[in-house]
Image: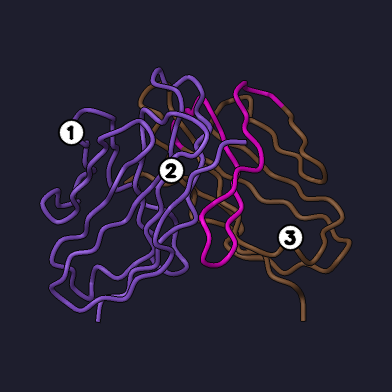
Chain colours: A brown, B purple
Amino acid sequence: GQQLNQSPQSMFIQEGEDVSMNCTSSSIFNTWLWYKQDPGEGPVLLIALYKAGELTSNGRLTAQFGITRKDSFLNISASIPSDVGIYFCAGSKAAGNKLTFGGGTRVLVKP
Amino acid sequence: GAVVSQHPSRVICKSGTSVKIECRSLDFQATTMFWYRQFPKQSLMLMATSNEGSKATYEQGVEKDKFLINHASLTLSTLTVTSAHPEDSSFYICSASRDRDLVDEKLFFGSGTQLSVL
């Protein structure tokens, strides 16, 4: 099935650093969602975006819905150890509510 | 916030047996539930859409006779993996939407079920 192109696939963070990841698509989505998944758990919704150009924050997280409706990014400011996990973007088109997921960004702690 | 409960969290079974996984919406009525499959280090792949009171809609390539879905009430959907084989071993996750008109596109996910078929 169609997937969103999410990058980077993985990244190492050091406590206090800012983290950025993005998703792009060749087609338009009307809703963008960002989830975090910890090992052995289901995804947990972080931020939902409904309007092109929308910029939304949730604590240290900020996400934006691209103006073209074909992309979105997620920023994490001042990262902490518990930010480690896999982050997924997901997009939804107008009807059906079926989510298309990105491939995930695995956030790891620098040794 | 909305809570979706999935049970069991982990199951180990012998090849050829059937396994049932339950997905419950705890504080809302879920008119639509979704079942996903996730292999290690991969993304979630939608298997089927379950609508209360009607037949499930399966994604291309998903065997409906292999993965039986029942959504008999507004708070419960079940996925039965029939005659499970080792290749069916995977992490299965359900999600639920409270909105029949699908305007609220925020989905709430269960905690997943790790199926291991020996």
Would you say A71 lies left or right of B44 here?
A: right
Would you say A7 lies left or right of B94 here?
A: right
Question: Which residue is more in the foreground, B3 or A11?
Answer: B3
Residue A83: which numbered mark, if any? 3
Q: Residue at x 63, y 46 (%)?
A: A22
Where, quadrant-wise, is the C terminus of chain A in this rendering?
bottom right
Hey, what amino acid is under mark 2?
Answer: Ser
Q: Residue at x 76, y 40 (%)?
A: A62
Residue B55: which numbered mark, if any? 1
Hey, what amino acid is under mark 1?
Answer: Lys
Hey, what amino acid is under mark 3?
Answer: Asp
Which class describes the residues within 10 Å of circle 3: few (<14), some (14-19), or many (20+)? some
Determine whether B117 is above or below B55 in the image: below
Q: CA distance from mark 2 to mark 3?
A: 23 Å
- Chain at tag 2: B
Marker count (numbered): 3
**Secondary structure of the residue carrying numbered label 2:** strand
Query: Residue B99 at x, y = what percent?
Result: 44, 23
Residue B36: which numbered mark, if any? none
* Residue linked to disc 2: B95
Q: CA distance from mark 1 to mark 3?
A: 39 Å
Query: Residue B70 at x, y = what percent?
Result: 22, 42
Write down the region rendered in magenta.
A26-54
Would you say B113 lies left or right of A37 here?
A: left
Query: Residue B63 at x, y = what percent?
Result: 14, 52
Question: Which residue is more in the foreground, B78 or A54?
Answer: B78
